Amino acid sequence: MKKIKYIVALAAATLISPVTFADEAAIKKALSEFMPGGQVDSVKSSEVRGLYEVTMGGNIFYASEDGKYLLQGQLFDVEAKKNVTEAKLASVRKASLDKIGEQKMIIFKPETSKHVVSIFTDIDCGYCRKLHSEIDQYMAQGITIRYMFFPRAGKGSDSYKKAVSVWCAADKNKALTAAKKGENLDAKTCENPVDEHMALGEAFGMNGTPMIVTQKGNILPGYVPAPQLAKVLANE
């Protein structure tokens, strides 16, 4: 969703308003009418008086107490020089990934795992293929890679169908490696999480693949070589 507005706030100069049952009910009702199908996970007081922090999927919005006004953007604490929203989004992303669960991911795990990352990948993306061609290097660095699909061409595209075929293969890891090498796979269909992966990627603000999400919920856009990724994760 496009950013509607950016909010710059001096948190030290504000008073936090407690969320009342009436406020929460009004906000949930307004949002359910504005975004049918969307589920409000939580409504909390924000750092700005009269503005409430609303978590929906992998997103954070800010709403007026009556739910009439909704803002999407970054809230900054000017005094502390801190992006308040981004810090909280990391926790939201982590919770969203935990909710999906590893049973809906394709996992490449080293003998000794030091770090875990979740990667949104497109089978036909050049840098996604480059990253996977170096999978042994990531394993050597002790990085567990949990793959999810984000075919950029969209639902029903060849990339989407390849993702489904990989998921439905008897050996998902082997099929994914073959597909990323450009090998033809037997077309298969079955119950799969590809649409769920795509929806989560969109909620995370996906604008390209690969997109790496660290164990703490921080985003690293694009391809990151194994040694560099190991350093980033060690210092996170």
Image (tube, rainbow, N blue to C red):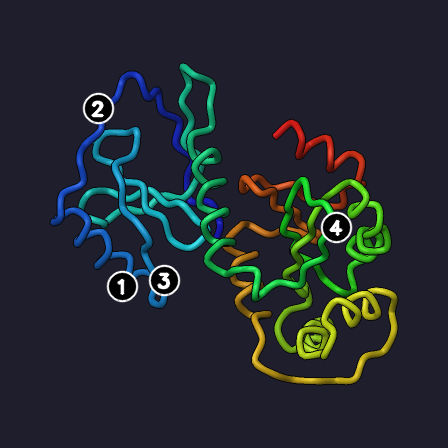
Label 3: how many residues lie within 10 Å, few (<14), some (14-19) or many (20+)? few
Label located before the other in sequence (2 or 1): 2
Gap in angstroms between the C-alphas marked 4 and 1:
46 Å
Q: Residue at x 64, y 46 (%)?
A: 116
Q: Are marks 2 and 1 in contact (CB under 8 Å)?
A: no
Q: Residue at x 46, y 58 (%)?
A: 99
Looking at the rendering, in which quadrant would you find the C terminus?
top right
Label located before the other in sequence (2 or 4): 2
Label located before the other in sequence (2 or 3): 2
Gap in angstroms between the C-alphas marked 2 and 1:
29 Å
Residue closer to the observer: 47 or 7: 47
Label 2: how many residues lie within 10 Å, few (<14), some (14-19) or many (20+)? few
Residue extending farthest to the front is 111
Label located before the other in sequence (4 or 1): 1
Indicate whether 221 appears above or below 107: above
Give percent across and percent down for residue 64: 24, 42
Give percent across and percent down for residue 51: 26, 37
Q: Are marks 2 and 3 in contact (CB under 8 Å)?
A: no
* Residue, disc 4: 110
Give the number of the disc on residue 15.
Answer: 2
Q: Nearer the viewer, mark 3 or mark 1?
A: 3
Q: Nearer the viewer, mark 4 or mark 3?
A: 4
Q: Where is residue 31, by image quadrant?
A: bottom left
Residue closer to the observer: 197 or 107: 107
Q: Residue at x 21, y 34 (%)?
A: 50
Label 4: how many residues lie within 10 Å, few (<14), some (14-19) or many (20+)? some
Label located before the other in sequence (4 or 3): 3
User: Which three-letter amino acid code belongs to the residue tagged 4?
Assistant: Pro
Indicate whether 85 appears above or below 21: above
Q: Nearer the viewer, mark 2 or mark 1?
A: 2
Label located before the other in sequence (3 or 1): 1
Give percent across and percent down for residue 37: 36, 67
